[in-house]
Image (tube, rainbow, N blue to C red):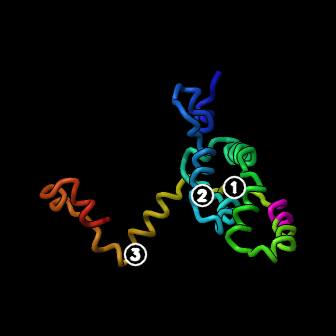
Amino acid sequence: MLRAPEVLFRPNALGVSGDSGVDALICDSIAKCNPDIREQLWNNIVLNGGNTIFEGFPQRLLKELNKREPDRSVLVDAFVRRHWTQERLSEDVMHLLKRFASYKCNVVAPPERKYSAWLGGSILASLSSFDERWITKEEYDETGPSIVNKKCL
């Protein structure tokens, strides 16, 4: 029997091709970011939204992400190439190896994550700078859906 939340980690269980589980998507997103901030991103994965409140979801995500953590030697190599000259290499590589040995993934699961989108939307709507983005029914009826792109993007 397959439980519904499992497809968030193994979409191929429903016949969806590719490795597009939530853990893979997070890893791919972090890999596309500047190497200098990847460690901070790995240490600050914040969950929000209704699907994250499934029982055990934060723990399962952390387990899956830890399986996917990038190879530390690749991190050290990339970091060294970006920041150090050959003469400083030996001293600094030891420092980096120690640094990346303690490299940990951290998943933060705030208790109010079910309502995060609503909270963010209400804060955004209360800002005075948002006033010019309000769309009236008359504007929408006159222009159609394209009014959203004109006023909000």
Q: Is residue 130 magenta?
A: no
Q: Please, what is the three-letter code of the amino acid marked with disc 3?
A: Leu
Q: From the image, which quarter does the N terminus lie in?
A: top right
From the viewer's side, name the closer residue of 77 and 124. 77
Q: From the image, which quarter does the C terminus lie in?
A: bottom left
Disc 2 or 1, which lies upstream in sequence?
Answer: 1
Q: State the extent of the magenta-drawn residues as a range.
A: 97-102
Disc on res. 112: 2
Residue 102 vs residue 66: left or right? right
From the viewer's side, name the closer residue of 55 and 147. 147
Pick out the residue farthest to the left. Answer: 142
Q: Are marks 2 and 1 in contact (CB under 8 Å)?
A: no
Residue 39 falls in which quadrant of the image?
A: bottom right
The residue carrying mark 1 is 107
Residue 73 falls in which quadrant of the image?
A: bottom right
Q: Please, what is the three-letter code of the amino acid marked with disc 1?
A: Val
Question: Residue at horizontal 75%, vertical 48%?
Answer: 66
Tell me if residue 12 comes above or below residue 54 in the rendering: above
Q: Residues within 10 Å of mark 1 (few under 14, many from 20)?
A: some
Disc 3 or 1, which lies upstream in sequence?
Answer: 1
